Amino acid sequence: MTELYINGQLAVLSEDFYFTLASENPYFTRSSNYSLDIELPMSANYAIFGHINRLDVTKKKTILTAVLMVDARCLLSGSAVLMSVEETRVKVQLVSGNAEFNLLTNDDIYVDELDLGSDWTPVVGRPIGGFLPASEMVDYYGSVDQVESVWLPVFYQDVNPENLNNNAQYEDGSNRFLPCPEFLRTCIQPYLMTVITKIVEHFGYTFDTSFFDNNFLRNVYVCSAVASLGISSALPHWTVSEFFDELEKFLGVITIVDEHTKVVRFAKLNDYFSFSDKEVINEDAVLHEFSVEIEDKKDDKDISSGNVSYDLSSVTDDGFLRLDRELIEAAQKTEYNTYDELVQAYNAMSDENRKKTLFVVGRRYYINYNEGDKNSLREVNLYADLIRNPESETSASLRIVPAKIVQYNIGTYTFLSHNFDYVRTDTPLFFNIPVVSFHKVGYEQSAFNIQEAIEGNVELQEKQKKSDIMEVAINTGIFNRHTVNGQSFDYAYPFTDYQQRPEGLVSTLMPYSLSLNDVCPDSIGNKLSSLNLFHSDIPYTIQFITDKLPDVNKVFLIGNKQYLCEKIEAEIDVNGINKVMKGIFYRID
């Protein structure tokens, strides 16, 4: 027997009630359970739909709670979406889990337009004069377990003092500091985990953060030069659906939504089918008429099997010094076991040979880099593509990208109490500072030349177009020791690779990297390189007989062969579920 509860009330079903229930695996489709259109008699269900078929009732998008019970089993717990209304009937569609979450977020809802809250730390924590004690650094530069966002310095477009936001002035000879001295240049930079949590909660769900436990990616934060205290202002102009698409690629995860608890969580791609229990369909339950559809391979853009790249602006002139594949193949390469061995060989070479050599240590590449009359070793190709198939030009493109990092002398200061002035000293203090591609004065439009605006030489804020990428860096909340001129300072150093060590840094950065090269265990490259494609590219459409709707998220054992299931369709009428079901499967290699 079939029972459908909508808005807490039992719906009246017609005698010819019939619909298709689809159960999809989020591993393949990012969806889960949903129905095709369900037709209900209007007159018998006035208590639920409240005369919405009348002409004077505004037809707006209506979403009601729904529970589908079939043969005393709950097959769906989610929402009923009103699809159409006529004089005598109403059509709804049922959704739950991932499908329900997609419904709420699939409209033109943009993450940078959501109300995700603000952080007023730079306002309420400002001193009247002088510097803050070092103990308060955690409020501005702490870890993701201590704060929701950081206020680290950031450049926009060019390394120019006029383009420096979230500047910080550090007292000469101590660890005291003055964060964000210019309020109109204050830019919130939320942790990625904060952003995900806020977005999920905005739609009434809870985010399970366990994926980030003991995971270096918990330290990733969004680099932003948009002057604002609002979290959403730091985000790109992406729809919520785009945001989760990009998250799944960058993190190597599947998004799973529990239809009963309304909890959203991430599962690692490699761990998704790791549980041992299986759905078993006996060979005699498989109908003989099944079809095998051979399709072109569609995995070139899959991060598990295809080539992967960051969506950076150009090949070489972007601060990342990336090299073309052809250049790497053609270059004279010399490999070394250690960096020290490389340095020793480099120092023994002539200038001419240095210029012709691509030095290789493991997955890292170096060249002789000339600046004026100075030659030095420079790492290159840190953000090159992850190549699995050299013959393929197609790649999965990641739009969450590492920010360019520069090492900049931010200096130290003394405070003159008699005139409340901060004076820079001669003591150098080099910091890692991200450089981002988009900037906006969020508090108010600065003055501009009206004639130049008329002539099109001034870009008004409302006409500025955001970058189509989200630039990120790593901040561990660890205050690293910096020594210069006999003085020691302890400050936070953001980075995208742990070898980005500014001059004077004594302590080591945590061994994390956003490189697509497998440069260390805690790197994007290592995570992506270890991904496996479990199944073949051939979809099998199989009809089978069963007493209940199987769990599509499990491994299937069908006729002594193992399969992964993309989708199962079941027909349901007033009497219950049809025991003949149809599924799309991929054989496990």
Image (tube, rainbow, N blue to C red):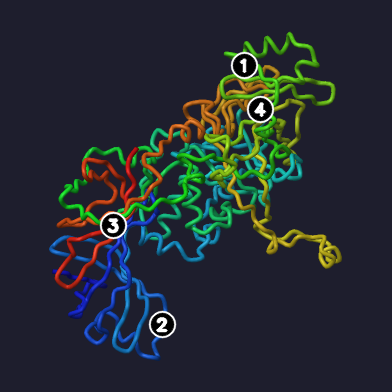
Residue at x 59% of width, y 39% of height: 402
Residue at x 25% of width, y 45% of height: 556
Q: Where is residue 289 in the image (x, y as percent from the top left)?
A: 25, 56
Disc 2 vs disc 3: Cβ atoms closer than 8 Å?
no
Q: In which quarter of the image is residue 70?
A: bottom left
Amino acid type, label 2? Lys
Q: Is residue 340 left or right of residue 100?
A: right
Closer mark to the observer between disc 4 and disc 1? 4
Point out the tag, 4 or 2, that comes first from the N-terminus.
2
Of 304 and 503, the residue lying toward us: 304
Does residue 214 show up? yes
Point out the tag, 1 or 3, that comes first from the N-terminus.
1
> Neighbour class for label 4 at 10 Å: few (<14), some, many (≥20)?
few
- Alpha carbon of mark 4 to alpha carbon of mark 3: how far? 47 Å
Of 156 and 402, the residue lying toward us: 402
Q: Residue 329 carries which label?
A: 4
Disc 1 vs disc 3: Cβ atoms closer than 8 Å?
no
Residue beneath disc 1: 335
- Alpha carbon of mark 2 to alpha carbon of mark 3: how far? 33 Å
Residue at x 76% of width, y 35% of height: 423
Amino acid type, label 3? Ile
Q: Residue 59 carries which label?
A: 2
Of 48 and 477, the residue lying toward us: 48
Q: Position of residue 389 (x, y in %)?
A: 54, 36
Q: Which mark is residue 568?
A: 3
Amino acid type, label 1? Glu
Point out the tag, 4 or 3, that comes first from the N-terminus.
4
Of 110 and 516, the residue lying toward us: 516
The quarter of the rendered structure image containing the N terminus is bottom left
